[in-house]
Image: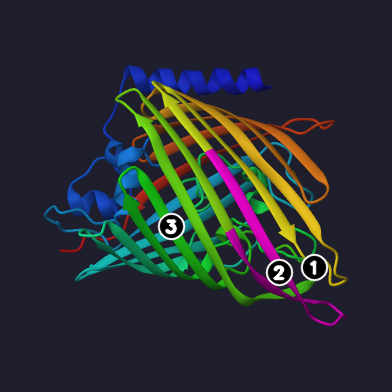
């Protein structure tokens, strides 16, 4: 099955390589600064180096701003060869992306239109501003944690990344859930540092997917504080080497059905390594967690997990990926993800196969397209 996946992706990549066509970025920023897709994206919505720079500067550049849309729509049709029980083989879903500049403030909205039987919901909504003098970015609102692989904005496949979505005991707050609060980012030479302070979290399934009942109500009993560091050790035209570290912790209030509430004091620690050379890109993360009351009976539970990912870009707007995920909370879960994607104008074609130990592999794919709202001046 994986051979068929690779063959299909290779044909698509060969087709676009032999007849390249200009592609548009998400039109909000493309029209605002007269960009093309390749300025910020490798394969939408994945960002390249300039795209990450643009995002870390609050989606602002010292360039003239032109007529622009204030919103765009990203629509995706996902296919699963062997869908879960009571799930359709084809699952449509979409999001509205909005952005507007008011003086030094940029507003950003990521609104899910619903998918997989779930309701529409606001997934991200924040205000940000960038200070050129101190090279600092400030955000306030509903934002993503500064994970190395963004679960909401820069997805490169359809499978959850390792420990990102893990629950520990009755603590149902994963790393992938957006937070309500404040975020600060500052650059010191080759070092980037983020500080996060959160008082609440997104409740529901990502992208409006069908909510999964957990049997408990949760809230942040004390603010969650985090420190995130990433340092570029070496960088040339062809290669790059980065390392990073994270410390995150807070207290989650938990009210299980039919029981008294309790408080789970938790910590999460992460290590990151990233290396790129030519058309190859390698990234790995390892996370460790401690929950001091994971079940309401003062059970101290450890958790761990991470991933290792290798990607190859035969052309700038296509890639092949291989990823190994593993996490224990305390039950061990592992999988291999084989995937490939290519961008043709505003479309992304993605195919992947997931292999879990002792199970048959399952194949899925998605067609994603981005298009603008009305043009404003």
Whole-number angstrom distance, CA of label 3 to CA of label 2:
22 Å
Q: Quadrant of the C terminus?
A: bottom left
What's drawn in magenta, residue-wise?
248-272
Position of 12 relative to 165 (above/below): above
Q: Is residue 356 left or right of residue 112?
A: right
Q: Secondary structure at mark 2?
A: strand
Q: Is residue 263 magenta?
A: yes
Instruction: Tell me which residue sits at (49%, 19%) in the image.
Output: 10
Instruction: Tell me which residue sits at (85%, 69%) in the image.
Output: 298
Whole-number angstrom distance, CA of label 2 to CA of label 1:
7 Å
Look at the numbered discs 1 and 3 and tell me whether their residues touch, using CB distance below 8 Å. Answer: no
Where's residue 21, x and y in %?
A: 28, 29
Where's residue 287, x and y in %?
A: 65, 47
Q: How dense is the environment of label 1, judged by Cα within 10 Å: few (below 14), some, or many (20 and up)?
A: many
Q: Is residue 60 magenta?
A: no
Position of 276 relative to 223 (above/below): above
Name the image quarter holding residue 47.
top left
Observer able to see residue 190: yes
Q: Which residue is mark 1?
A: 293
Q: Secondary structure at mark 3?
A: strand
Q: Which residue is mark 2?
A: 265
Q: Which residue is mark 3?
A: 194
SS majority, magenta: strand
Observer able to see residue 46: no
Look at the numbered discs 2 and 1 and tell me whether their residues touch, using CB distance below 8 Å. Answer: yes
Q: Using the image as rendered, state which of residue 240 and residue 30 is in the foreground.
A: 240
């Amino acid at each position: 099955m994986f051979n068929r996946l690779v063959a299909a992706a290779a044909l698509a990549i060969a087709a676009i390589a032999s007849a390249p066509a200009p592609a548009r970025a998400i039109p909000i920023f493309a029209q605002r600064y007269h960009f093309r897709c390749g300025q910020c994206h490798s394969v939408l919505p994945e960002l390249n180096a300039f795209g990450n720079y643009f995002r870390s500067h609050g989606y602002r550049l010292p360039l003239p701003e032109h007529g622009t849309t204030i919103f765009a729509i990203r629509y995706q049709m996902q296919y699963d060869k062997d869908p879960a029980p009571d799930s359709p083989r084809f699952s449509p879903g979409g999001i509205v992306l909005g952005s507007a500049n008011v003086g030094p403030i940029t507003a950003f909205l990521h609104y899910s239109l619903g998918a997989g039987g779930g309701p529409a919901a606001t997934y991200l909504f924040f205000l940000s501003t960038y200070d050129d003098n101190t090279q600092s970015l400030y955000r306030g609102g509903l934002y993503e944690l500064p994970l190395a692989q963004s679960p909401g904005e820069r997805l490169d496949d359809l499978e959850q990344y390792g420990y990102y979505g893990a629950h520990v005991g009755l603590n149902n707050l994963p790393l992938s859930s957006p937070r309500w609060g404040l975020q600060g980012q500052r650059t010191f030479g080759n070092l980037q540092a983020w500080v996060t302070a959160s008082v609440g979290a997104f409740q529901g399934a990502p992208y409006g997917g069908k909510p999964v009942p957990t049997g408990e109500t949760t809230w942040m009993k004390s603010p969650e504080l985090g420190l995130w560091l990433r340092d570029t050790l070496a960088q040339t035209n062809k290669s790059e080497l980065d390392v990073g570290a994270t410390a995150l912790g807070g207290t989650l209030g938990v009210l299980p059905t039919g029981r008294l509430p309790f408080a789970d004091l938790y910590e999460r620690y992460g290590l990151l390594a990233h290396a790129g050379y030519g058309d190859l890109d390698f990234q790995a993360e390892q996370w460790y967690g401690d929950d001091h009351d994971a079940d309401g009976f003062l059970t101290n539970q450890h958790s761990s997990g991470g991933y290792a990912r290798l990607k190859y870009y035969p052309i700038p707007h296509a890639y092949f990926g291989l990823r190994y995920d593993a996490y224990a909370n305390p039950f061990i879960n592992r999988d291999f993800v084989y995937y490939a994607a290519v961008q043709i104008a505003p479309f992304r074609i993605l195919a992947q196969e997931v292999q879990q130990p002792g199970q048959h592999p399952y194949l899925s794919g998605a067609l994603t397209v981005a298009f603008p709202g009305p043009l404003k001046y």
